[in-house]
Amino acid sequence: MSQLTKTLLVAGILLVAGVSVGTSAFTTAQVDRQANVDVVADEAGLLGLTDGTSGDLVFQNGEGQLGIDFTAGTAGGANTNALFELGNPDDPTNSQAFMITNNDVESHVINTEYRANTSDATTEDNLKFEVYDGSGALVDTISASGATASWSAPANTAYYVVVTVDTGHSSDLLGPDADLSGTLGFSIDDTVEGGA
């Protein structure tokens, strides 16, 4: 093979390689994908929160958010030296304050805590949220005195919550000016990836 042929062959290969690299480069690109992020009421969300069988004290408000309010109607709050159970701890699947449901198609760890507005709720277990599974077994308890709860929830699984408010019946007596109000908070972890 002559030197000229070799030179032309190498030049041809370099030209083909240059064209191949040149055609795969670009300065801009645009790719569109669909995203479906509807905002729904608590009961239909990824973490479903649905009022149970406790009447008007536990309800879905006008924005579809779960609420607990002892001042519903004309009441000023919970009586002193009294015990209120919203739901039945002996039959929580049929009588509960509210339900927590993992409406996702995969398992999640559900973490909960109660953040009280005042120290009135943190000295004793005056306010408790007991979480039960579908068989009626106690899963965990959240309390205003600092007990948090965490459990693994399989996909499309419901949990039943019984709320107990004790203003002195079996705990320290709370005066008529005490306030147990606060926020029940939830965070969800992905059991596969481990992130929140």
Image (cartoon, grey):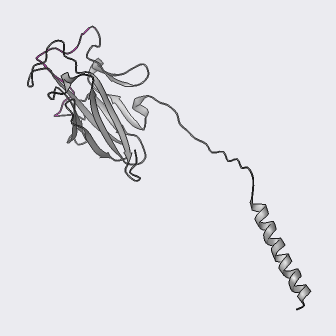
- Front-most of 139 and 8? 8
- In which quadrant of the rendered view does residue 22 lie? bottom right
How far across and how far down the image is residue 52, in percent?
A: 30, 27
Name, please, the residue furthest toward the top.
74
The quadrant in which the C terminus is found is top left
Residue 102 part of the magenta segment: no
How far across and how far down the image is residue 84, in percent?
A: 17, 22
- Front-most of 11 and 174? 11
Q: Which region is colored magenta?
A: 74-91
Point 89% across, 88% down: residue:
3
Q: Is residue 51 left or right of residue 77?
A: right
Residue 88 part of the magenta segment: yes
Residue 33 in view here? yes
- In which quadrant of the rendered view does residue 44 lie? top left
Q: Is residue 91 left or right of residue 192?
A: left
How far across and how far down the image is residue 167, in percent?
A: 14, 20
Q: Main secondary structure of the magenta part?
A: loop
How far across and how far down the image is residue 76, in percent?
A: 24, 10
Report how many numbered discs are placed on residues in the image.
0
The quadrant in which the N terminus is found is bottom right
- Front-most of 26 and 37? 26
- In which quadrant of the rendered view does residue 144 lie? top left
Residue 94 in view here? no
Above or below residue 164? Residue 17 is below
Name, please, the residue furthest toward the bottom.
1
Q: Is residue 85 left or right of residue 171?
A: right
Point 71% across, 49% down: residue:
29
